[in-house]
Amino acid sequence: MPCSTKKTSLGFTLVELLVVIAIVTLLLGSSLAIINPPLIFAKARDTQRISDLSNLSAAIDHYIIDNGIPPGAKNVMRLSDALPQGQVGPLQSASSGWIEGNLTKYIRKLFTDPTNLGDLVYRYKNDGVGFELDCGLEILTLEMQKDTGNSTARYEVGTKLDLL
C-alpha cells in the first residue's frame, strides 16, 4: 500500500483568522471615522429642535387667533427645563407644562429640547401681542443666522423675534 503524504485542509489556520480579523477591524474603524456618529446625532437633534419650534409656534399662533393674546404671563421668559410656579407638570403637558396656558386644543404635548440641559433648552416669551420661541443649535448654526431674529447665537421663531 502506498503511503499518502497529502494532508487535506478542513479549516483555517490561526494566522489566517487573525489576518481576517485585523482587516475587518481596520475597515470597521475607518468607516466609523468617516461616518462620525456623534456628528450625525447632533444634526438629528438640531433637526428635531427646528421641527419642535415650528410645531410649537403654529400651536401658539392658533391659540392667539382663538384667544386674542399669547399664552402665559406677559414679559416672563419660560424655559423648557422648569415648570412655572403653580404648574403641576409634567414639563411636556400641554395643559400644565413649561408654557402657561392650556394648549391641548392646539398641540398634543409641549416639546422639550432633546437634551434639555444648560444652554440647550427651549425658551418662550410674549409681550401680550407677539411671542418668540428660541433654542440653541449644536451643528446647524447657519440656521441661527438665517432665521431673521435678532440673535445669531440662537434659532428663533415666532411673531416678534426681538423679545429674547
Image (cartoon, helix red, strand yellow):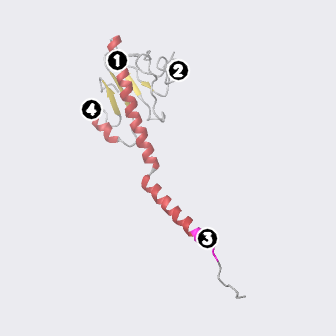
Query: In front of the other: label 3 or label 2?
Result: 3
Task: Give x and y (percent) for residue 69.
Answer: 34, 13
Q: Earlier in the sequence, mark 2 or mark 4?
A: 2
Q: Secondary structure at mark 3?
A: loop
- Residue type indicated by callout 1: His
Q: What's under tag 3, amino acid-wise? A: Phe
Q: In this view, which residue lies farthest toward the right? A: 1
- Does 68 sit above or below residue 55? above
| 155 to the left or right of 14 | left
Find residue 148 and name its label: 4
- Viewer-side label of 1, 3: 3
Disc 1 versus disc 4: distance between alpha carbons? Answer: 22 Å
| Quadrant occupied by the N terminus | bottom right
Q: Residues within 10 Å of mark 3 (few under 14, many from 20)?
A: few
Q: Secondary structure at mark 1?
A: helix
Task: Based on the picture, tell me whether residue 41 belongs to the magenta stretch.
Answer: no
Relative placement, left or right, of 14 versus 156 is right
Q: Marks 1 and 2, Cα distance to the nearest angstrom? A: 22 Å
Residue 106's place in the image compared with 48, above or below, is: above
Identify the residue under disc 3. Answer: 12
In the rendered image, residue 92, in percent from the top left (x then y), is placed at 49, 24
- Considering the numbered disc 2 on the image, is that residue within a helix, a strand or a loop? loop
Q: Earlier in the sequence, mark 3 or mark 4?
A: 3
Residue stretch rendered in magenta on the structure: 8-18
Q: Is residue 130 above or below residue 31?
A: above
Between 51 and 118, the one lying in front of the other is: 51
